[in-house]
Amino acid sequence: MPYVNIKITREGATKEQKAELIEGATRLLADVLGKNPQTTVVVIEEVDTDNWGIGGESVTVLRQQNG
Amino acid sequence: MPYVNIKITREGATKEQKAELIEGATRLLADVLGKNPQTTVVVIEEVDTDNWGIGGESVTVLRQQNG
Amino acid sequence: MPYVNIKITREGATKEQKAELIEGATRLLADVLGKNPQTTVVVIEEVDTDNWGIGGESVTVLRQQNG
Amino acid sequence: MPYVNIKITREGATKEQKAELIEGATRLLADVLGKNPQTTVVVIEEVDTDNWGIGGESVTVLRQQNG
Amino acid sequence: MPYVNIKITREGATKEQKAELIEGATRLLADVLGKNPQTTVVVIEEVDTDNWGIGGESVTVLRQQNG
Amino acid sequence: MPYVNIKITREGATKEQKAELIEGATRLLADVLGKNPQTTVVVIEEVDTDNWGIGGESVTVLRQQNG
């Protein structure tokens, strides 16, 4: 019954990609620790690039610098 | 001063239902552990059904299968 | 399939009290939102009083001031 | 490589204020613990006032009472 | 720069298994969303079975019933 | 009434350093957003280096490589 929380920036992940994350994370816990997939919960949270920082700068600013 | 985080799928919980969750969780901590309600914080997070998985499938897909 | 995370200071909550929190939180989600208790997950995290702050002070210090 | 999660009510924090939170939290970890700013991650989550409770009441209601 | 938080019950996961979870979750985000592995953070939290509930019961009790 | 969660690796942060993190994070929210320090909650979580990964490797391994 693991709980996996995946936080990513909101930059257009599709419904299909999210389904792959859910399936992949569930399989990972089953493969590595033998956890029952039926009770593994995966929650994906998408965060605006203004609200995500690394290295002291928002991702919004980092994307502009790399643009 | 407990902190309670409730994550649910975004499927139309009303303002009144959220108020009941806040009140009920606060009372639970007071009843069971004697925690001061004044400093109990409750945060409800609603997650799109595409972003919530159980059993390796998104809730969006599960709802369709059960529809 | 809600997920409830309860954070409290580590100050001697018993196994019985934790069981009451799990049962009460699960019932709350069933009563208010009709959520299936079988897939409601509750995770309790106990945090050292040195590691919990409110009002800019650790709970360790606050407990001493109120002692 | 610390991870800092800041949850606030969604009440109009600007892009500039969020940038200050990111920069300030990153600096705090560097100043106090010598953590490398390059790998410090800060995630800000804004929560509707209906979904945030303290003292058993939602912030929506508290704001009206204090209005 | 995703952040992945994996919560599992504390039931003897080894250092090697945790390394596999870290590597697998990082690869999953790279494969599905093209995320740079260098800035993907994975945090595993192990929770006592008394502190984890599903179906309104602690995992401690569930393990005894299934024992 | 912000909630700040700081996750760091468990590598000997002292009680005094934790108090500085609590005070600094509380002041940051007051300075930037005018939040009332009395209801700002800060929770510090220390995570074993085996349980923290970046770049697909645990911090335990990274520390050895850099040793």
Image (cartoon, coloured by chain):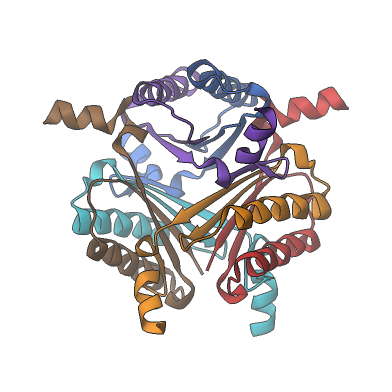
Chain colours: A orange, B purple, C blue, D brown, E red, F cyan
Residue F49 in view (yes/no):
no
Residue C61: image x %, image y %? 35, 45
Instruction: Give the residue at x 49% y 63%.
Output: F13
Residue nearest the observer in this picture, C40 or C19: C40
Instruction: Give the residue at x 46% y 69%.
Output: D40
Residue nearest the observer in this picture, C34 or C60: C34
Residue A45 in view (yes/no):
yes
Query: Does D3 appear above or below B25?
Result: below
Residue F45: image x %, image y %? 51, 53
Residue nearest the observer in this picture, A16 or A44: A16
Where the C terminus of chain F falls, by quadrant? bottom right
Residue D56: image x %, image y %? 34, 24
Where the N terminus of chain F falls, by quadrant? top left
Query: Does E43 appear above or below F63?
Result: above
Residue B63: image x %, image y %? 63, 32
Query: Does B63 appear above or below E46?
Result: above
Instruction: Give the residue at x 57% y 23%.
Output: C35
